[in-house]
Amino acid sequence: MARLFYPAAWRSDMVEDLFGFPVSDPYRWLEDGDDARVRNWAAAQDRLFRACRDGWREKRSWASLLDQMSSFGVSEPPMARGQVMFLAEQLRGDEQRRLLVVDAQGNRRVLVDPVQVDPSGHTGLYAWWPSREGERVAVQMEVAEQPGSDILVLDVRTGETVDGPLPRARNTSLAWLPGGDAFYYVSRVADEELDPGDKRLQRRVRLHRIGSAWQADAVVFGGDDAPDHYYGLTVSADGRHLAITATAGPASQNDVYAAELVDPEAPRFVKIVDGAAIRARVLPRFLADNDLLLVTDYQAPCGRVCVARRHDADPAAWRTLVAEDPQAPLDECLVLDDPALPRPLLLVARTRHGASDLTLHDLDSGRPLTGLPLPGAGVVSSLRTNNPHGRHAWFSYCDATTPPTIYRYDAGSGKTELETGATIAGRTPEIRSRSVRYPAGDGTEITLFLFTPAEEHQGPRPTLLYGYGSFGMPMRPWFFPMAAAWVEAGGTYAVACVRGGGEEGRHWHDAGRGPHKHRAISDFNDAATWLIETGRTTPGQLAIFGQSGGGLLVTAAATQRPDLYAAVIAEGPLCDMVRYEHFGLGCTWTEEFGSASQPEQLQWLLAYSPYHNITPGASYPAFLLTGAVTDLQTGEAHVTKMCAALQHATSGDRPILMRREPDTAHAAFPASKERALAADILAFAGQYTGLSPEKTTTRSRETAAEPH
């Protein structure tokens, strides 16, 4: 294979002295995306990528196979309010999902169709919050490449806009007051009120009354002393109390404040949880008597459910309702307290060895009553119920061969049934799914999910290894069309549950963040080593793939052990860990990674930062670095700087490519762009591991042609 001629990138001799550490940054100039030199260089990289992609002979076959594996319809449980249900649907050919309303007779109608608002498909339905009575709904639309998100309020009966837009509400939380005439929401301070260049979150909790100008919305919480806080809002069923969770960035602990709404525009808050003091996460919700149900990892790394008085700030006074299970991390829970039920119930979802289980408990005592049967050993997510008092519980279920499917549990009859009209499945692949445990270098056992073709096969297979390992996000054996296509073509898809994720609870996250982030990376390389040593694959057949924080994981793993891999795919990655705080939302992630402004933490970052650990003359695997031209979360400079540095350093003949996507964001593609990216990733991984979909697609065409 001939070595590519890469577009020339000026390599400066820039070296910064940071606390006595000389830190080289030869491609700092690529951070300025408005510079003509940067634009010209990036355009040349675009041409190089397109030229290489034209040589991937099986790209169309991969795209066809991916399309066959995809499912359409409704993948999230509905929100039931009053006499109507709200649900999102995306059919084959749709660029974005649309918001539907289902009345008591089961009649469906479209309430919001983003493509009617923006035929280009770049405006998406981001979030929606129905009022408790179901008569109004607050809707948030988002344009992928723009930083702002507005809230509109619609009349559910007519579909007409009755209020808004309310600006600067990106990633907001929203809680309606009873009656549907007012709600609390979160929005960013206007730019003109901030210092020039201030990239902090700078959010405030406000009260909005329908029909009033947004400029008059009273700020009820938040201030200059909390520039990087996220806020979660919960109002009690009777509308008399408000609880707010306050979290600094993605920190693993949060504060909780509660107030009685004597005056909704000026609530007097009591701090009932001090997250820094107890170093725990606490998520509150109000019970019927306005006491609090608390889901927490305080003194319970795998989670427990407690009950507390709403103004009791002493954790010692919390009563444990459902105790921690050290072998099964708590995912979520749901209260079912319809007055028609014989007793109020608590539905609890846990994950045991990668598979979910659902159990019912008495809400008063916490006593377990029964387990709910599930379709298989898969994953349950997104528990939802009627609001304010629930009788039904809806949830999503999926496994390796089952796309997200909606089920409804009736607490009155005790029956669990498939929600009709939920999902239009693609061709169901035959996949063998199992979990194994492999040893990390320090002896810790790590879970690895393996998805393989159902037929027996002796010898190694082309393998695509995925991981994340950040922010306490757990990996589960979800249905993933890209994984299904890879396995259908004859490969192995593997997911490593490395430290830094949340698969084993709070302690698992703590073991792979901050000064311990190196463990996540070594765990991932240990997964690759295990796959090779057990004969499941070879270095020439092994590709790795990660998104966002997982992009950091795979690029760091490959710079440490390039000999293990044939190909690396990093989507929207973090690569320059010395300067990540200067890009996107990076300044809010120091709790997870550390800060280069602190000498000791700088050393953590330099030890694994992919951009700073590239070795000149090393023979690197094929790299595909993908990212949006406008990435408001990680920033686009990670991709450009990493690409230039690898192209300069590698002595191998495998390509280092950059795939840029205009008019999208970090993770907000129109559907066609998302499918095109997935097909490119599969084609790239297949090209450099030797996996061909041609046999599979030929077999599929022959099967379709057979008489029935």
Image: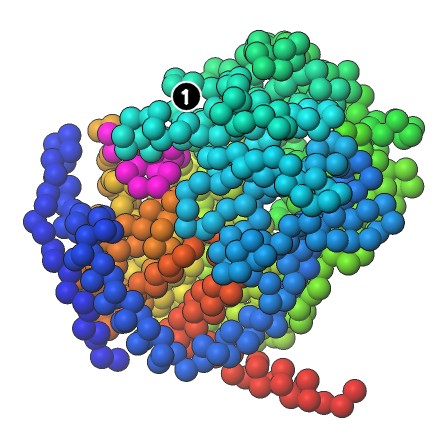
Residue visible at 67% across and 16% down in the picture: 241
Count the marks: how many? 1
State the image coordinates of residue 290 (x, y, percent, origin top left). 73, 16
Left or right position of 42 against 447: left
The colour scheme of the drawn protein is: rainbow
Give the image quarter of residue 104: top right
Q: Residue furthest left?
A: 13
> Which span is picked out in magenta?
581-597
Q: Is residue 307 visible?
A: no
The question of residue 301 being in magenta is answered with no
Q: Quadrant of the C terminus?
A: bottom right
Q: Is residue 5 visible?
A: yes
Left or right position of 459 against 656: right
SS type, badge 1: loop
Q: Residues within 10 Å of mark 1 (few under 14, many from 20)?
A: some
Indicate whether 41 appears above or below 109: below
Residue visible at 53% across and 22% down in the picture: 217
The residue carrying mark 1 is 226
Residue visible at 75% across and 37% down in the picture: 134
Q: Viewer-proximal residue, 661 or 68?
A: 661
Indicate whether 134 appears above or below 262: below
Left or right position of 243 against 54: right
Q: Which amino acid is tagged 1?
A: Ala
State the image coordinates of residue 21 (x, y, percent, origin top left). 14, 36
State the image coordinates of residue 283 (x, y, percent, origin top left). 60, 26
Q: Quadrant of the N terminus?
A: bottom left
Residue visible at 14% across and 50% down in the picture: 26
Indicate whether 516 appears above or below 691: above
Give the image quarter of residue 607: top left
State the image coordinates of residue 668 (x, y, percent, origin top left). 48, 52
The question of residue 586 being in magenta is answered with yes
